[in-house]
Amino acid sequence: MDIFQSTSGSVLTLTLKGRLDADGTDKMAGLLAGYIDRGERRLVLDLSQVDYISSVGLRALMLAAKRLAPLDGRIVLCGPQAPIRHLLDVAGFTSMFSIVATRDEAAERML
Amino acid sequence: MSSVSAVFVNKRTEIERVVELAERFGEEHQLPAEVVMTVHLVLDEVVANIISHGYDDAGEHEIHVTLALDDSVLGIRVEDDGRPFDPLAAPPPDLDLPLEERPVGGLGIHIVRSVMDTVEYQRRGDRNVLIMRKTIGRN
């Protein structure tokens, strides 16, 4: 799992590349926790280059969203490939996250 | 029908080998990437769950995995000698709950049931046997 970051205004975008398996999730969850600790409240996760996610990764996304909710923060998930999108649907993420196709749409959701 | 079998032990590092098995099986049968991901995902969820929760002692245990392809039916069989555990007994998660009320657990077996067509559990003697099948599209 490689993770690249970019900032635009108050929005932090993390581009994830690789597998959100146990190891990849450890890396993502550690980074997310650090950014939230630091005060980041608007997070876009670009999933377009993620080719695998298990319940471990889904759980970590839920935990981060649960932590952000009372802080008036949010996570937008962006660009998942079809198999990943399917798993997000299976896990019921549609009602918990904004899931959008492009980064432009993600930016709009942050307004 | 053709099949491959592998034995894993109850260590977390074994999960990497699960990926290798799924990929090798996919290459041998020229399976689409999405099917390989399904095999990887199912083994990841089931084997990780057994390793994390299956045993009452700290000793080494074997987990036997068989992958089979019969025409267009993919079969995945996982057998362990852990404590009796019927993953199908767990109720499905309530996906309509708002974020604040959603428990974070219970997703693994829900995903397995969702991506496979059938999942059967049997307790045979001192072993748990999980048999999963899915009809797949071939290249």
Image (cartoon, coloured by chain):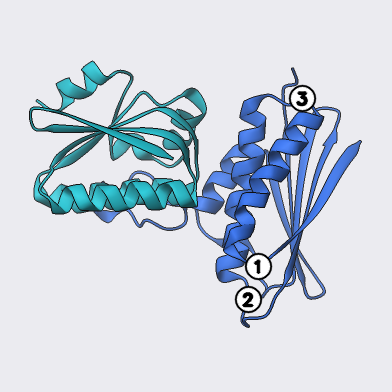
| Mark nearer the N terminus (2 vs 1) | 1
Element at badge 1?
Answer: loop
B50 is higher (above) or lower (below) than A1: below
- Please indicate, yes or no, whether residue B94 appears anywhere in the rendered image: no
Quickly name the residue at label 3.
B30
Identify the chain drawn in blue.
B
Residue at image x 28%, y 48%?
A31
Left or right position of A96 against B86: left
Question: What is the chain identity of the residue bearing mark 2?
Answer: B
* Chain A tint in image: cyan
Residue B100 location in percent, x, y? 23, 53
Q: Quadrant of residue A43?
A: top left
Which class describes the residues within 10 Å of circle 2: few (<14), some (14-19), or many (20+)? some
Compared to residue A98, the image places residue B119 above or below, namely below
User: Where residue B128 appears, x then y in whole percent?
Assistant: 73, 66
| Labels 3 and 2 share a subunit | yes
- The x, y position of residue B30, in whole percent, is 77, 24
Q: Which residue is denoted by mark 1 in the rendering?
A: B10
Q: Are marks 2 and 1 in contact (CB under 8 Å)?
A: yes
Tag 2: amino acid = Tyr
Residue A82: x and y, percent? 48, 24
Residue under circle 2? Answer: B55
Label 3 close to label 1 by CB (< 8 Å): no
Which of discs 3 and 2 lies nearer the camera? The answer is 3
Earlier in the chain: of badge 3 and badge 1, it is 1
Residue B45 shows which numbered tag? none
